[in-house]
Amino acid sequence: MPIPEKIHLEIVTADKQVYSGDVDSIIVPARTGYMGILPGHAPLLAELGIGEILFTEGDTTEDVFCSWGFVEVLPNRVVILAQTAELSSDIDLKRAEEAKARAEKLLMSGDPNVDYAKAELAVMRAINRINAAQNMSLRRKRKP
């Protein structure tokens, strides 16, 4: 069986389809680290962590912020089921920075009623959302 030239990518959450299309390559934030996927990849199932999904189509690189979920890889198709996912271009940078500040304030409060694990995860999500938005902005500025 020949290796396909493209791989079909589906990114979905419980309430919406974030992306669907044929791409050249994909990078996903697996729980154990970032993983690259090309057409013809061996089948696998992996848990997602918090980070950016990057995918290329020709000369264009797009990215999606995601947190938690699963990725199913087949030779000609990748399905990402994420708890949260949003195109980096849709991220409200000010809101993400405010969420980070709120979570950091909780962590520093010393309040014994604070769920520190949840607050740390909120900081991680906010930092990764900020990074995704800033990385997309930088890529757009570099384009001729």
Image: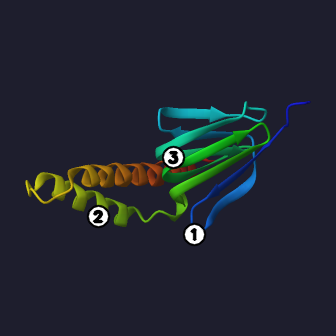
- x then y, percent, for residue 49: 46, 43
Determine the secondary structure under disc 2: helix
Going from N to C along the chain, the mark reached first, 1 or 3, is 1
**What colour scheme was applied to this rendering of the protein?**
rainbow
Marked residue nearer the N-terminal end (2 or 1)? 1
The answer for how far apart the CA atoms under marks 2 and 1 are is 24 Å
Rendered view: 18 above or below 135: below
Q: Residue at x 50, y 53 (%)?
A: 65
Mark nearer the viewer, 2 or 1:
1
Q: Which mark is residue 15?
A: 1
**Position in image of residue 41 (x %, y %):** 73, 32
Q: Amino acid at mark 2?
A: Glu
Q: CA distance from mark 3 to mark 2?
A: 20 Å
Give the residue at mark 2.
98
Q: Read off the residue under disc 3.
A: 52
Hey, what amino acid is under mark 1?
Asp
Quarter holding the N terminus is top right
Q: Are marks 2 and 1 in contact (CB under 8 Å)?
A: no
Along the line of sight, which residue is nearer the eye, 63 or 139?
A: 63
How many numbered discs?
Answer: 3
Q: Given the image, on which type of amino acid does mark 3 rest?
A: Glu
Q: CA distance from mark 1 to mark 3?
A: 19 Å
